[in-house]
Image (cartoon, grey):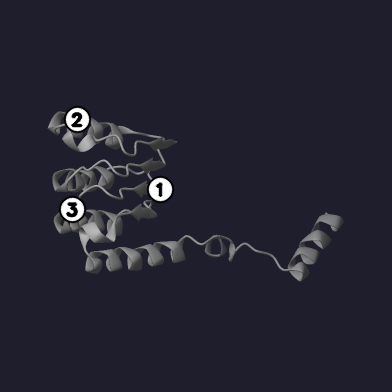
């Protein structure tokens, strides 16, 4: 469920590698965490990865730090990050995509984290001690 491919120099591997990698991520049914840091991918890989992540519904965390992305790749990845509810964390380097885009990623991260906090999931089903006593009294009499 975790794939770590950091610092493998994928950036110089060419478009055939990008196509194969992209297809494998789109068709994957179990990968939840992808660490792809330091591969010097460049802008075209960043844009393609954004398209790839948009078609994947299992990835929860992706790290793409130090990959020579630019603002074009950053914008594509931000658009994907905003519209993929299952993708909770997408790590990028601020110095590559620019501070303005990086701030937008941080804001989106805060929104996603707030909506997935465990307290939110269990608030409606959490029972107080008085409520649990009432439920126990039903089980005693029935």
Q: Residues within 10 Å of mark 3 (few under 14, many from 20)?
A: many
Q: Which quadrant of the structure image shows residue 49? A: top left
Describe the element under mark 1 as helix, strand or loop: loop
- The earlier-in-sequence mark between 2 and 3 is 2
Residue holding disc 1: 60
Residue 12's x, y, as percent? 17, 34
Q: Between 128 and 80, which is closer to the camera in this rendering?
A: 80
In the picture, the quarter occupied by the C terminus is: bottom right
81 left or right of 138? left
Q: Which quadrant of the structure image shows residue 126? A: bottom right
Describe the element under mark 2 as helix, strand or loop: helix
Q: Residue furthest right?
A: 140
Residue displayed at 55% across by 60% down:
118
6 left or right of 41? right
Residue displayed at 47% across by 60% down:
116
How far apart, in angstroms, are the residues tagged by discs 2 and 1?
A: 23 Å
- The earlier-in-sequence mark between 3 and 1 is 1
Give me the disc on residue 17.
Answer: 2
Give me the disc on residue 73.
Answer: 3
Residue 53's x, y, as percent? 28, 45
């Amino acid at each position: 469920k975790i794939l770590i491919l950091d610092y493998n120099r994928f950036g110089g591997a060419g478009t055939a590698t990008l196509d194969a990698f992209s297809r494998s991520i789109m068709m994957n049914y179990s990968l939840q965490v992808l660490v792809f840091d330091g591969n010097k991918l460049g802008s075209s890989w960043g844009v393609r990865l954004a398209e790839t992540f948009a078609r994947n519904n299992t990835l929860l965390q992706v790290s793409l730090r130090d990959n020579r992305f630019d603002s074009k790749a950053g914008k594509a990845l931000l658009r994907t990050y905003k519209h993929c509810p299952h993708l909770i964390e997408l790590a990028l380097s601020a110095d590559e995509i620019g501070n303005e885009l990086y701030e937008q990623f941080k804001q989106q991260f805060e929104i996603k984290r707030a909506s997935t906090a465990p307290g939110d999931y269990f608030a409606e089903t959490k029972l107080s001690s008085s409520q649990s006593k009432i439920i126990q009294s039903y089980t005693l009499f029935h």
